[in-house]
Amino acid sequence: MIVVLTLLLAAVILAVAAPKVAGQAQMRERMARLGVSPARTRTIGDLEVLAVAGLLLGLLWWPIAVAAAVGLTLLLIGAAGYHARAKDPIPVVLVPVVFALATAALAVLHILNA
């Protein structure tokens, strides 16, 4: 279960991080609408990539996975807050909430499995 959830989360988070890190115009526009500067967008993308690395390395040593999952959970809660503040539709706000719950669950699974 831990491996499957880790790989799914890593794939999804990497898919949303790549356009941020690359400075893709469409991503910059979406983030600007949320009130996020290009520099902060890049930083968020970098943090997401680091979190993915932590999740994957955590398959070898669980404390790294817990740290990465907790950090990612907090980042995703922040994303939900930005979407809510921008008055995005409820489904758009709920997407990062669902992934935050999944990353929190992964941290708990690692702790219980330790």
Image (cartoon, rainbow, N blue to C red):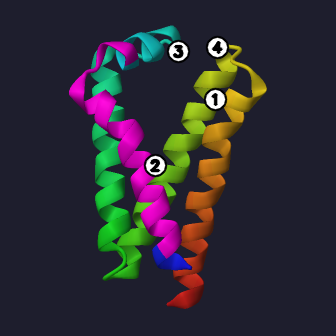
Q: Which residue is mark 1?
A: 81
Q: Which residue is mark 3?
A: 34
Mark 1 and mark 3: span between their CA atoms?
10 Å
The residue depicted at 66 percent of the width and 43 percent of the height is: 97
Foreground: disc 2 or disc 4: 2
Give the residues drawn in magenta, as a range: 4-26
Local SS, label 3: loop
Can residue 7 be found in the magenta stretch? yes
Give the mark nearer the N terminus: 2 vs 4: 2
Tag of residue 10:
none
Give the mark nearer the N terminus: 4 vs 1: 1
Mark 2 and mark 3: span between their CA atoms?
20 Å
Q: Position of residue 78 (x, y in %)?
A: 56, 35
Mark 4 and mark 3: span between their CA atoms?
6 Å
- Choose top left, top right, bottom left or bottom right for residue 15: top left
The residue depicted at 48 percent of the width and 57 percent of the height is: 9
Foreground: disc 2 or disc 3: 2
Q: Which residue is mark 2?
A: 12
Q: Which residue is mark 4?
A: 86
Check whether the beta carbons of the residues at disc 4 and disc 3 lie within 8 A of each other: yes
The residue depicted at 46 percent of the width and 49 percent of the height is: 12
Q: Main secondary structure of the magenta part?
A: helix
Residue type (three-letter) at the residue carrying disc 1: Gly
Mark 4 and mark 1: span between their CA atoms?
9 Å
- As drawn, the residue found furthest toward the bottom would be 114
Residue density around tag 3, few if under 14, some if 14–19, many if 20 or more, within 10 Å: some
- Picture layout, residue 58 above or below residue 15: below
Give the mark nearer the N terminus: 4 vs 3: 3
Residue type (three-letter) at the residue carrying disc 3: Leu
Q: Position of residue 8 (x, y in %)?
A: 48, 60
